[in-house]
Image (tube, rainbow, N blue to C red):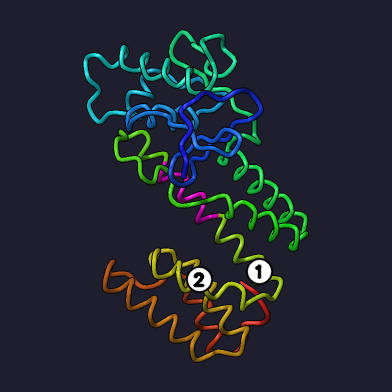
C-alpha cells in the first residue's frame, strides 16, 4: 500500500485509531512519523476537541518521561502540524497554556463514529426499536479493525489505560448487539460471535449466559447445559469461584424448562 509523504488539507482527512493507527488523505495513507510521534497523535485523538495536557501527553508517550520531554513534545507536535496541513495557525492543533487541542470533526475519526453509533443504538434499545438498535450496534462494531493502538509499541501507562477502557466499551457494545439479536430471535446469527468471544474472554459470564440462551431457544438444550458446565469448570479452576447468580439462574430455568423465549 502506498504511503503519501505530503500534507493533508481540511475536509479530506480521516483518522483511524480503532486498530493500527492510520491517517488517510483522499484515501492515501500519510506517513505520520515514528513510534513516539504516533503515540502523541493517538493521545491527541483520544482527547479530540479537548485539551491534552502536557502531563497527560507525557504519561501517554513515556513510561519515564525524559528531562527533554517538553522539547520533544513540541518537536512531535510541529511535525504533526506539517503532516496534517496545519502550519501553526490553529486550524488543526491548537496550542493551549497547559497543552494542545486537536480539532476533529465526527466524520473524520473512527472513534467518534463508534461513539455516535453506540449512543444511537442505546437510544433505539431504550425506546424498544430493537431492529434499529441492532443496525446501530453493527455499524459501531464494524468500525473496529483490531485493538486500539495495535502496532504501536511505544506507549506509556496513560495510553495503555485508554486502550483497556476502549476495549471494555467494545465488549459492552458486543454484549448489547448480541442481546438485541437474541430478542429478535436471530439466534443463528450470534453463535459464531459468541463461541469466539467466550474463548477469548471466558471471565465475562454475560457472554456464557447469552450463548446458553441462544442454544436453548434453538432447541439445543443439551448443548446449553454443557455450555454451563464448561463455564463453571473454567471459573472454578481459574478463580476458585462458582458462576454468578445470573448464570446459575439461566441454568436452573433450562433444567426446569421455564426459560421462555429470550427472557433473562
Along the horizontal axis of the image, is 75 left or right of 21? left
* Label 2 Cα neighbours within 10 Å, binned few <14 / some 14-19 / many ≥20: many
Along the horizontal axis of the image, is 30 left or right of 119? left
Reading the image, the residue beneath label 2 is: 194
Quadrant position of the C terminus in the picture? bottom right
Residue appearing at x 77%, y 55% in the figure: 127
Q: Position of residue 249 (x, y in %)?
A: 52, 76
Q: Position of residue 106 (x, y in %)?
A: 64, 34
Query: Of residues 18 and 169, which is closer to you in this image?
Result: 18
Q: Position of residue 252 (x, y in %)?
A: 51, 83
* Label 1 Cα neighbours within 10 Å, binned few <14 / some 14-19 / many ≥20: many
Magenta-drawn stretch, dominant element (helix, strand or loop): helix
Which of pointers 1 and 2 lies earlier in the amino acid sequence? 1
Along the horizontal axis of the image, is 98 left or right of 125? left
Label 2 secondary element: helix
Reading the image, the residue beneath label 1 is: 181
Residue appearing at x 56%, y 25% in the figure: 8
Residue 166 belongs to magenta span: yes
Q: Which residues are magenta?
A: 163-172
Q: Position of residue 34 (x, y in %)?
A: 33, 30
Q: Quadrant of residue 157?
A: top left
Compared with residue 34, is residue 160 higher up or lower down, i.e. above or below?
below
Amino acid at each position: 500500500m502506498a504511503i503519501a509523504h505530503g500534507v493533508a488539507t481540511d475536509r479530506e482527512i480521516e483518522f483511524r485509531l480503532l486498530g493500527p493507527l492510520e491517517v488517510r488523505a483522499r484515501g492515501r495513507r500519510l506517513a505520520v512519523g515514528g513510534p513516539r510521534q504516533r503515540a502523541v497523535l493517538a493521545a491527541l485523538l483520544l482527547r479530540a476537541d479537548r485539551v491534552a495536557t502536557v502531563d497527560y501527553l507525557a504519561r501517554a508517550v513515556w513510561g519515564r518521561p525524559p528531562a527533554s520531554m517538553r522539547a520533544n513534545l513540541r518537536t512531535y507536535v510541529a511535525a504533526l502540524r506539517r503532516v496534517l496541513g496545519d502550519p501553526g495557525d490553529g486550524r488543526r492543533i491548537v496550542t493551549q497554556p497547559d497543552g494542545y487541542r486537536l480539532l476533529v470533526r465526527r466524520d473524520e475519526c473512527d472513534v467518534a463514529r463508534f461513539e455516535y453509533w453506540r449512543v444511537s443504538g442505546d437510544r433505539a434499545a431504550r425506546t424498544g426499536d430493537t431492529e434499529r438498535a441492532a443496525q446501530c450496534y453493527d455499524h459501531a462494531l464494524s468500525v473496529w479493525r483490531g485493538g486500539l493502538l495495535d502496532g504501536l509499541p511505544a506507549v506509556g501507562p496513560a495510553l495503555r489505560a485508554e486502550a483497556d477502557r476502549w476495549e471494555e466499551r467494545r465488549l459492552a457494545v458486543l454484549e448489547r448487539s448480541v442481546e438485541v439479536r437474541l430478542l429478535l430471535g436471530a439466534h443463528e446469527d450470534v453463535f459464531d460471535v459468541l463461541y469466539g468471544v467466550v474463548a477469548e474472554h471466558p471471565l465475562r459470564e454475560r457472554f456464557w449466559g447469552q450463548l446458553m440462551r441462544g442454544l436453548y431457544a434453538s432447541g439445543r438444550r443439551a448443548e446449553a447445559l454443557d455450555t454451563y458446565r464448561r463455564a463453571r469448570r473454567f471459573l472454578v479452576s481459574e478463580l476458585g469461584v462458582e458462576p454468578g447468580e445470573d448464570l446459575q439462574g439461566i441454568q436452573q430455568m433450562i433444567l426446569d424448562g421455564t426459560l421462555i423465549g429470550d427472557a433473562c
